[in-house]
Amino acid sequence: MEGKRRGVDRKAYYTAKIRKVAQLLFYKRHSLPGAIGWELRRRVGSDYPKVVNLLNEYLGKIGLTVKIVFEEESNPPENPTLEQYDRARFYITLKDNLGVEEAKMIGWRIDDIAALCASIAYIISKGGKVERKELEDLLRSKIPNWRVDINLNKFIRLGYLVEDENGQVYLGWRTRAEVDQRKLIDLLLQAEAEKKT
Amino acid sequence: MGNLIGDRRKSVREAREELQRIIELCRSVEVKGLDPYLVEVKDLIKVIKEYFPIWKDAEDLCLDAEALNSIASVVKMQGEWVKRRASALYRDPFLIEEKIRSLPVGSMAEIFLEVWHPIVEFEQLTIKEFREALKYWSNLLPLDERWKRVGYVKVETETTTREEMIKEGLLLGEPFEAELEKMWVDLKERASGVGRVKYWDFIGSDSYEETVRRAYLASFLITYGYARLEIHYLKDEIFILPNEKPTPIDKGELISFPIPISFEEWRKWKERGGA
């Protein structure tokens, strides 16, 4: 009887924590969505990675997932320490892929998505940064001139890309959170191979 | 003799130009993202070494140092270049560019949709927030009352003593330690739950005089280890966190962090709605 009560208490304890973490991750409080590890630790305690896992399991059932972006982005740790979690950023993203129609429903035109894809892939291929002019020339080969500037500014405003004062463009925080870069490059290569055969 | 001096002048000028060219070359590799291995580092070092004995002016030595620094940047880029090439993400840039140019827009979009997992976020109000906002609104004084400007005379900044502070009514006559203890208890109460309070919300008060008094005491709370500061430079936020027990600070760790408590700062804080 005592054991059962302890189990119920434990369940209630974690349910309350899961709610707190969900609120922190869903509601935008700063200029960026999501939360940093230390913010979660402060609100729910040092066992927050466990709480995040529980929330992730729950969200998985409705097609969402908790995405963790570690500081060591190029080489994410296999077994992260609490310190690495503390410095990481936590977001909630879609677990599954969007279809073309669904993408349109959330306000993205097909050619805008293609332009974003081209920009990200091009920056990756150039080692992480390109001159804005170079990127504009690339996009101009596929989309009307007047949309190139609008598109690039939109990608920068949304955080997919970052531009510095020297006109160099880099990948932004949103690309790191939302895009599987390795898979993107692999798929691009495969698409080329399919075209040749 | 005249010829010799002329030759030397000429060679110094040429050497300077040579160093400038080296600096430009290194810079262009960095800015244009060119292959850093295009730069023959060994040859450049040889040139710098060769010219080094002729430098006499500090300006020339600075140029020499700048050229060396540029070469060091290229060496660093070479290291990164090797790392990138060795990474799993590396693919031939020309191949990728060719693919980007040749694939139709529709296929590109489809590929991206397979790797894109957009962030889900909410921005709407919750009932709880709405209730808190309503409470805040009803307690908020009208603008003309909050922005009441207090006439003041600008005076030069001077140092002050505790006795003067008591005389001016900024500090009470009771023992200093007792005042500190009171502040500490107050801080602990305000920080209970979240563990910290915004610095200005803690020291800020209805009157400017009281704000200065609290800031003065808060500085001692920190120096004596009753509390500590948490500074977020990027967000321009300062928090004060109470320590459970007074923790003496190691002298080696002591740093001085000035926080201006000017009348203008206080007025801005009041206009933002205070604590």
Image: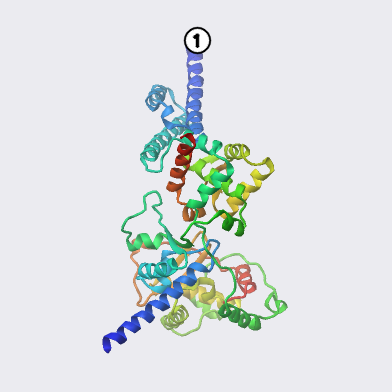
Q: Quadrant of residue A108?
A: bottom right
Q: Is residue B153 left or right of residue B81?
A: right
Element on which disc 1 rests: helix
The image's colouring method is rainbow
In the image as oriented, which residue stretches furthest toward the front? Answer: A197
Residue drawn at 47 percent across, 56 percent down: A177
Q: Is residue A48 left or right of residue B7?
A: left
Residue closer to the observer: B32 or A55: A55
Residue drawn at 35 percent across, 69 percent down: A50
* Pointer 1 chain: B
- Mark 1 packing: few (<14 Cα in 10 Å), some, or many (20+)? few
Q: Is residue A131 left or right of residue A70?
A: right
Could you tell me if residue B106 is visible in this image? yes
Residue at image mark 1: B3
Residue closer to the observer: B128 or B175: B128
In the image as oriented, which residue stretches furthest toward the right? Answer: B144
Residue closer to the observer: B251 or A183: A183
Q: What number of labels is visible?
A: 1
Percent coordinates x, y for residue B131 in the rendering? 59, 82
Percent coordinates x, y for residue A102 in the rendering? 57, 58
Could you tell me if residue A169 is visible in this image? no
Percent coordinates x, y for residue B224 in the rendering? 39, 72
For residue B75, above or below residue A147: above
Q: Is residue B41 left or right of residue B271?
A: left
For residue A121, above or below residue B217: above
Percent coordinates x, y for residue B247 in the rendering? 34, 73
Residue drawn at 58 percent across, 77 percent down: B209
**Placement of the C terminus of chain B among the 4 image quadrants:** bottom right
For residue A59, above or below residue A3: above
